[in-house]
Amino acid sequence: MENENKKRLAVLVGCNYPNTRNELHGCINDVAAMRGTLVNRFEFDPGNIQLLTDAAAAGSSSSVMPTGANIKKALGAMVDQAKPGDVLYFHYSGHGTRIPSLKPGNPFRQDEAIVPCDFNLITDVDFRQLVNRLPKGASFTILSDSCHSGGLIDKEKEQIGPSHVTEISNTSPSVSSKPKGIPFESILHHLASLTGINTSDIATHLLELFAADASLKFRLPPFELLNMFESLNPDEGILLSGCQANETSADMTNPVMTRGKACGAFSNAVQMVLKEHEADLSNRQVVMLARQVLREQGFEQHPCLYCNDENADATFLCESHISSSL
């Protein structure tokens, strides 16, 4: 049972995009598996775990659809009810993308985003704003199993990233796999087909389609975006990304490793790490061990860790604090 004064809250999102050209197969499996892990190992109350999947698009009515607005509503509600000492967790499995940066002085830079089922992009700025709202003493861990997920919390400190890539896999994956990313040009084409507007400015399309539900990146003036990051102090945001910002993450099926069940390569690697190590693991250890699993499986993707120095070596999902709070 959880300590009545300390909550463990989670939002789990799986997007398979069924019956579309972007269809994936393992994302709903990923969050279903993580739900079981949260309850059985990390002692989350099932009533404090919200699941959003697009299974409804495939004929099921058991889940809230993971539209951009629904995901942000669920995350916002989780952050708003958080108190000091609470542990918050967001697991996303689905497509990611990179979009041209709107930040002044960065004309050639690209920023990271996830792709909800309705293509209403949720960007690094949105995750930064959520982390900024977190009460002092609460923690917010984000695990994003998607392409280009490194750096998904804007301005978060890199602990394990591109500079830590010292190993290259010498084997090819013995699995059927597909990258979990949609190119910017494909997203732009899809949105333009919906708006009927002839422009390459993605903000125009997103604002036309989603108005106030569009990402802050496209709704706020540039100077307000800059003000959001002017005086950042070390915060409690923790990002475990499935790959670097310039890499893809894999959606895979393997008869041996996963018993024929589709899953995200990174989500599966984390599950394997947690099953093989019953003792507490730090955030740094989870990422490095997941890198090792993926390398052994032949995947060219390198999970990353972004957080402050203290949280890099804190236990994943504050596991060491569970027994002490009972």
Image: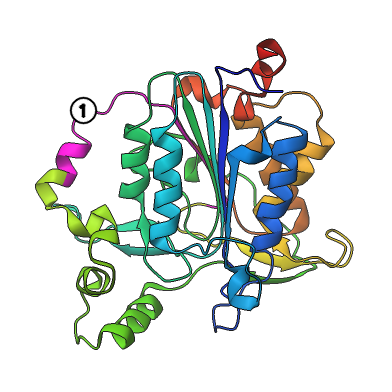
* Quadrant in which the N terminus is drawn: top right
* Res 272 quadrant in image: top right
Identify which residue is drawn at 33% across, 79% down. 191
Q: Do we see residue 241 in this rendering?
A: no
Counting from the top left corner in percent of width and height, residue 184 is at 37, 72
- Horizontal relation, residue 294 to residue 152: left or right: right
**Of residues 268 and 88, the one drawn nearer to the viewer in this rendering:** 88
Q: Is residue 272 left or right of residue 259?
A: left
Q: Which residue is denoted by mark 1 in the rendering?
A: 231
Q: Is residue 77 magenta?
A: no
Q: Is residue 31 above or below residue 156?
A: below
- Residue 58, horizontal then vertical, whole percent: 64, 77
- The image quarter containing residue 101 is bottom left
Q: Amino acid at mark 1?
A: Ser
Residue 183 visible: yes
Residue 129 appears at what percent x and percent y?
31, 41
Sort mark 1 into few (<14), some (14-19) or many (20+) by Cα contacts within 10 Å. few
Rendered position, 292 above or below 201: above
Residue 228 in magenta stretch: yes
In front of the other: 79 or 248: 79
Colour pattern: rainbow
The structure residue drawn at horizontal position 65% and vertical position 77%, both measured from the top left corner, is 59
Residue at the farthest top position: 324
Compared to residue 203, the image places residue 70 above or below, namely above
Judged left or right of residue 150, residue 62 is: right
Residue range of the region highlighted in magenta in the rendering: 225-243
Residue 175, position in %: x, y?
A: 78, 69
Q: What secondary structure is found at the residue carrying circle 1?
A: loop
